[in-house]
Amino acid sequence: MHEGVYREFEETIAAGERIEPRDAMPPEYRATLIRQIAQHAHSEIIGMQPEANWITRAPSLRRKAILIAKVQDEAGHGLYLYGAAETLGARRDELLDRLHAGRQKYSSIFNYPTLTWADVGAIGWLVDGAAIVNQVPLCRCSYGPYARAMTRICKEESFHQRQGYELLLALSHGTEEQHEMAQDAVNRWWWPSLMMFGPPDGESPRTERSMAWKIKRHTNDELRQRFVDIVVPQAASLGLTLPDPLLRWNEERGHHDFGPIDWAEFHAVLRGEGPCNAQRLGQRRRAHEEGAWVREAAAAYAARHAARPAGRAA
Amino acid sequence: MSGAADVPGGADRVPGGTDWPLWEVFVRPRRGLAHTHAGSLHAPDAELALRNARDLYTRRGEGVSIWVVPATEILASSPEERDPFFAPAADKPYRHPTFYEVPEGVRSL
Ligand SMILES: [Fe+2]
Ligand SMILES: [Fe+2]
């Protein structure tokens, strides 16, 4: 059935060119993208919460300004991605409804708590670091608007990772107590960061089709390995260790070996049993409801002034 | 032809409904360059669309001028008519300088 209608789509994908919004595309391609982009957008805006938790308690004005800028960037990333999903015919308000009803997911990493100031550093270094490894290949994704949004996002992410690294470096070289705080944060965020790449290749049912459509360019395990190989020497430069006794360089493979990941924990958090699932979703719903009067007032103001002409293009 | 480039269903949006209308954003990166499409955003009116566009697309000095256009106001050529629509250009190679033979040694031509 697809052969005739979607021949041009298949040819475009095969030629390594981009699909654009108004091209004919198989409904499953559209649905897969909407689900993936929405989940990605939700992760960006829910991801604001764990770090925003520390804005009022940042230890200096410099750190506070940096953290505000980073959290604001994450809001921007969410908006770029909702915008990309809308080019596929999704509606932003419907996507938000689905998030609020728990019918669409966000990255399980954000269901862990930020217990100390060092967590802000560990998130920047490890969580944003893992996100970058995941996202860089998406800049070449077959769907044009998603690829363009990712290009913009990746440019902004590098500051996120660096500020986290720098924060941990300062703590690691600080007092003994500060060093311990940094190490403790890394210990807690390490395994959840590795889980961010998703289930192992054998248990990731959608990977094959997404790779055929060039939405995905690498498997979960390939990206996870890439992340581990990048991060191990960075940890050494921080003077911190990674909490895995099996972590070692494998000369033969040319990669680091690492210990088994607790997938039972991953699935439990995904099911809603993580330490902060209820808190994150509750906060998101509350923010949305409490902002309703602003949206209504702005719409009422716009309706009243609709007749007034806007500035001319120049 | 149809309206609302890149926005299937864009034309049926109800302004002032549960979601604000969609605007397309164009940014001039620096003087001497044309505005290019940066993305889209929701805003209740043109003035707020402009402010939101500044916050969303120029947080790092990416622009010196912004245009915002209601998505429903954009008329786009349709992908299905692409071949006949752009066909008139395909059989006119004489519009390109490489079509012409010039003897060797002739310069500045
Ligand atoms: Fe982000
Ligand atoms: Fe980030």
Image (spheres, rainbow, N blue to C red):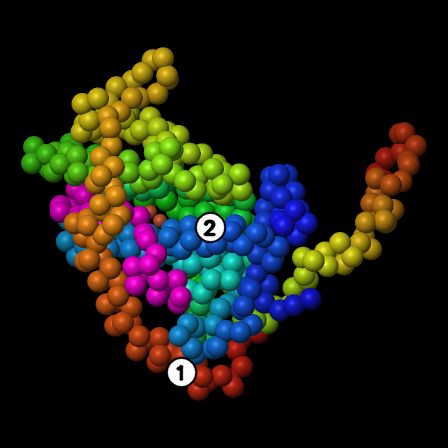
Residue ID for mark 2: A32
Q: Chain of mark 2?
A: A
Q: What is the residue that sits farthest to the front in this orientation?
A: A1
Tag of residue A57: none
Give percent across and percent down for residue A250: 31, 16
Give percent across and percent down for residue A230: 33, 28
Q: Height in image: A23 above or below B53?
A: above
Q: Chain of mark 1?
A: A
Which quadrant would residue A204 be assigned to in this image? top left
State yes or no: Cβ of the residue under disc 1 lies below 8 Å from any atom of ligand 1. no
Give percent across and percent down for residue A235: 24, 28
Residue ID for mark 1: A301
**Does the rendering let one see residue A136?**
no
Question: Magenta residues?
Answer: A93-122
Q: Could you tell me which secondary element the residue under label 2 belongs to?
A: helix
Q: Could you tell me which secondary element the residue under label 1 belongs to?
A: helix
Q: Residue at x 17, y 42 (%)?
A: A118
Q: Amino acid at mark 2?
A: Thr
Q: Amino acid at mark 1?
A: Tyr
- Quadrant in which the C terminus of chain A is drawn: bottom right
Q: Height in image: A130 above or below B71?
A: above
**Left or right of A29, for residue A256:** left
Q: Residues within 10 Å of mark 2 (few under 14, many from 20)?
A: some
Q: What is the residue that sits farthest to the left in this orientation?
A: A177
Q: Residue at x 68, y 62 (%)?
A: B77
Residue nearest the observer in this picture, A212 or B34: A212
Q: Nearer the viewer, mark 1 or mark 2?
A: 2
